[in-house]
Image: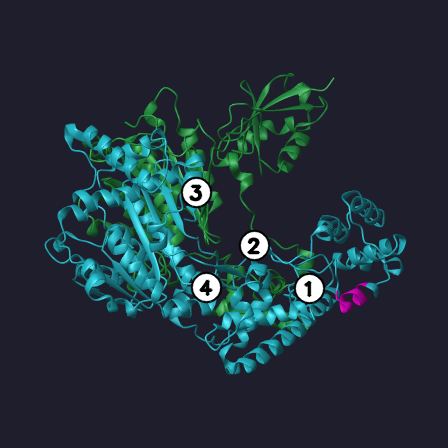
Chain colours: A green, B cyan
Amino acid sequence: MQIDGIITPLDDQQIQDALEQCKVLVIGAGGLGCEILKNLALTGFKHLHVIDMDTIDISNLNRQFLFRSKDIGKSKALVAAEFVMQRVPGVTIEPYFGKIQDKDDDYYHQFQIVVCGLDSVEARRWINAKLVEMVDEEDPESWKPLVDGGTEGFKGQARVILPTMTSCYECSLDMFNQRTSYPICTIANTPRLPEHCIEWASVLEWPKVWGDVQYDTDNPEHIQWLFETASKRGSEFNITGITYALTQGVVKNIIPAIASTNAVIAAACCNETFKIATMAAPYLNNYMMYTGNDGVYTYTFEHQKKAECPVCGSASMSTTLDPSMTLTELIDWLQEKPDVQLKKPSLRTATQSLYMQAPPVLEQATRANLEKPLSSLIDSGDTITITDAALPVSLQLRVTYAQ
Amino acid sequence: MSFNSQPSIDLKTQKYDRQLRLWAASGQTALENANICLLHASATGCEILKNLILPGIGSVTVVDDKIVDERDLASNFFLEPGHVGTNKAEAVTSLLTSLNEDVAASHRSEAPHALINATPQFFDAFDVILAMDLSDEDLIKLSDFCETNSKILISVYCKGLCGMFRIQAPEHTVIESHPENAVDLRLTQPMDELAAYAASFDLDAMDQTDHGHVPFVVILLQFVEKWKKEHDGKPPKSYSERNELKAQIRAAMRTPDEENFEEALAQLWRLASSNELSSDIRKIFEHPSCDVLTPDSTPFWFAARGVREFVNNQGQGQLPLAGKLPDMKSDTKNYVELQLVYRDKARRDLQTVMEHVHRLLQEVGVSENYVPMEMIELFCKNAAFAKLLNYRSITDEYTSPNTKAIADGLAMDENMAYYLVFRAASRFYAKYKRYPVGSGSDAGGDISRFKDFVSEWLESIGLEVDMETLAKPVTNYVYFKNKEVANLGALVGGLVAQEAIKMITHQYIPINNTCVFNGIASTSSVFEL
C-alpha cells in the first residue's frame, strides 16, 4: 500500500495477488482497446472481458495491431481476445461481440474495474450511468471505478471516475466539442465550403434520388456517388476543394487516428487501473488531458463533480413555477431544457403517477392530468421524479410555487 | 440511376487513411524512406518500434546480444515463451515484422556497446537511432557520431512507474507546424484589392436579405474606413475606441439576429492584433544561415531567405499572404468573390517569393530545381508558424550540465528530480554493475546508498541540492526494483514514436530536448537541458 507518494515495492507479492483477484471489463477492442488488452494482460491481470460490436476494417490496420488483413470482416472482440491469450499465457479474456446495452446488471456486477476505449459519447454516457446507478451504499462490491480514455489525432484524455464519489462522465458533458453541424439553409441555399456541397449531396440530394435507400458509408460506390454529386454542385457554385477523401471524412465523421497517441492514452488508463487494483501508488485524481501536436503536454487536474448532475448529483434540480402551469406546459419546458435532452418524459411523485408515457393502460389513466394546473396535483416543495428513454437515470425535480 | 464503377483506391491508401489525414502523402513518403535502429530490445524499445512499424516506417533494425530470459516475457509483448534461450533481437524482430508487411525488419545479434566502440560505421545506414539504457560512456560516443553524421538520436530510460527520453538532432526546421488557429485576414492593413472590394458594397441601399449576407470582413473594413474619416485618418486604437466602433456596428444592425453583424462584433478583436512578425519567423530570418547562402545551404534556407526578401520589399513588412478564408455568414457569390481576393493576393505573393528564390539560387550557382515549388508554396502558406529548433548535443549536456535549468526545474517540478535520479542510476550501474534495488531486508541500505551517490554526483557537477527534495524520487526508484513495467513502456513508447515521426516528417513540433513521464503522479514535463 503506497504511503504519501512512496510506492509499494513493485516486486511485492501483494501486488501480484491483487492483480490476479481483480476482474476487469474492457469496453472497446479498437484503437484503444487493443492496447488496453495487451497492457492489462502483461501487467498481470488474469481475468478480463472485452465487449465490442464492430468488425475489422482495412482502415483499422494502421493502429489496431491485434488484427491482420486476413481478419477483415471478423469481430474485433473475438480476434483481439484470441490474439492476446495466445501471446500472453495465463490470462483469460472472454469476448462479447455485441452492444454494452445487451448486458444486464448481473453481468456488470462481476467486475471490479471497468476500462473504456470507446469512440462514442452515447456509449460512454450509458456505461457511466449504469455504474452510477448500480452503486448500493449497503454493498461495497457494487462500487466499480471507471477508467475512460479517448483520442483524436495527436490529442487525448484519460480519466478516473469513482461513481457517486467523483465527477462522472455526465458532469463533464459540456467539455466535449459537439460534432460540426451545418445549418440547413447554408447547405440548401448559400454553400461556401466543400463540406457544404458534400452535406447537400448526402442530406438533400441522396434522398431525392434514392428515396428510402440509406447510403452505406462503408460502400465505396455510395461514397463515389456522393463525391461526384458534391463535385457537380461545387462547380455550379465555384467552390473548389471537394475530394473523395474529404467526402468520406464528412459523411463518416472520420477522426484521424495514429498508433502513438492511442498507445499513450491506453497506457495511461492501464497504469491507473493497475494503481486502483493494487493501491501500489496513488491513482489519478481525476483527469489528464494530453496534446502531442506541439511538444508533449499534459494537464492533470481534478474535474469537479456537479451537484445537480442528472446522473450522479445528490442535489435535485429545483425550480420555481407558476401554480397555474399545466402538466403539459411543464412537459414542454422539460423537453426544451438543453442540458437534459428529454424526448418523452414520464412524471410521478412518491405517492402518485402524474403522467406516464407507457404502458398504454397507464397512459390512458393519467392522460386527464395533462390539462390540470400543477397546484391541483402537487404541493409547493414536492419532488417530481422524471424518467425518459433518453435519460440513463431518473431526474429529481423539486418544485416550489411563485407567490 | 446507377453507380459508376468507382476508381479503386489502392489498399495502402485505405490502410493508412486515418494517418494520412494528419500528415498527408508527403509525410507518409518521408516515413517510408526512414531507417530506424533500436539498441537493446527492451519492452519500451519494442513498443516504440511497434508505433513506427504500424504507420509504415521504411525499415527497422534491432540490435541486442542478450538471450531471452523468462523474466523478459512479463513486460514485452513481442516475446513468447518459446523464445526463452534464444537471441532477444532475433526473437522480437520475428514478432514485430508481422505488424506490417510493408516494413523491412531485421536484427543484429550483437552488443550495442561493441558496435558503438568498434564499428560505428554500422550506424551510417540509419536516420534515427533509438538507444535504450545506454551507459553514459557509450551514449557520449554515440552522441558524437550522430552529431558528426547528422543522425537523430533518442536516448530512453524507463523503469518502474517513470520514464524519460532525450532527443538530439541536427538543426530541425518545420514549415508545416499545423497551427490550430491560423487565419490572416489583413484587417488592419488590407491590400488594395481587399479595400476596394469592401468599399464596393453599399450597405444602406441593400434589401434585407442581401444586408444579412454581407461577409463580416466587409462590414469591419467599411466601419473602420468610416471611423478613419472621422478621426483624422487614424483607425481605432484603444480598447474604448474599439468598443465605440462595436456600438456603431451594433447600431447598424437592421434586425437583432443578423448573423454576419454578430460575427463582425465577435471578430472585432482582430483589429487589435499587431502586424509584427512572430518571434519564431524572426528567429529564422535573423539566423546566419538565412544571411549567408552557399551551395551547401539546405532548400529550407533558400526558401526562408526568399520570403525574407519579400517581407523587406514588396511585402512592406508583411509575410506573403496565406490566402485562407474561414467560413462566415455570407451568400455564395460574396464569399467566393472575397475568397478570390485573398487567393489572388496569395498567388501573387507566392509568385514574387518564387522569383526571389530563383534569383538567390542563380546567384549561388545552384539549380532552380533544388528548391521544389511545393516547398515554397508551403512556406508561403505557413510562414507565420515556421519553426527552427537547435538541439544541444548529449555530449555537450553531459560534460557541461545546465545547472541553472536543473536548479530552476527542481524548485518547481518533482519530475526534474526523477530526471536526475534516472541519470544517477545509470552512473550507479556503471560503477557497481547493478542498479540500486535493495533486497529483502536491505532495501533501506540501498536507499541511503543511492541517496548518497546522487548527492555526491550533484555536488561534483556544482549543484547544491537539498536532498529532501530528492528523498521520495530516490526511494521510489529503489522500489521500482529495476522492473520493466508494461504500461510505462507502452506510454513512453508512444511518446518517443510520436516525436520520431515529427522529426522524420518535419511536421508538427517536436520537443527540445528532454521529456519525463511520471506514472505515479500522472504528469509529464519537458526540459531543455
Crowding near pointer 4: few (<14 within 10 Å), some, many (20+)? many
**For the stretch drawn in magenta, what is the main secondary structure?**
helix
The chain containing the residue under callout 4 comes to B
**Label 3 sits on what residue type?**
Lys
Marks 1 and 3, the one that precedes in the sequence? 1
Marks 3 and 2, the one that precedes in the sequence? 2
Closer to viewer: mark 4 or mark 3: 3
Closer to viewer: mark 1 or mark 3: 3
- Where residue B281 sits, quadrant-wise, is bottom right
Q: What is the x, y in percent for residue B453?
A: 25, 37
Q: Is residue B489 left or right of residue B23?
A: left
Marks 4 and 3, the one that precedes in the sequence? 3
User: In this view of the protein, which residue sits in the foreground, A5 or B124?
Assistant: B124
* Magenta extent: B191-198
Instruction: Determine if marks 3 and 2 fall on one subunit.
Output: yes
Disc 3/disc 2 C-alpha distance (Å): 33 Å
Q: Which residue is mark 1?
A: B317
Marks 4 and 1, the one that precedes in the sequence? 1
Instruction: Determine if marks 4 and 1 fall on one subunit.
Output: yes
Instruction: Determine if marks 1 and 3 fall on one subunit.
Output: yes
Disc 1/disc 3 C-alpha distance (Å): 37 Å
The chain containing the residue under callout 2 comes to B
Task: Determine the secondary structure under disc 1.
Answer: loop
**Label 1 sits on what residue type?**
Gly
Q: What is the x, y in percent for residue B185?
A: 69, 60
Figure check: A37 above or below B337? above
Q: Which residue is mark 3?
A: B404
CB contact under 8 Å: marks 4 and 2: no
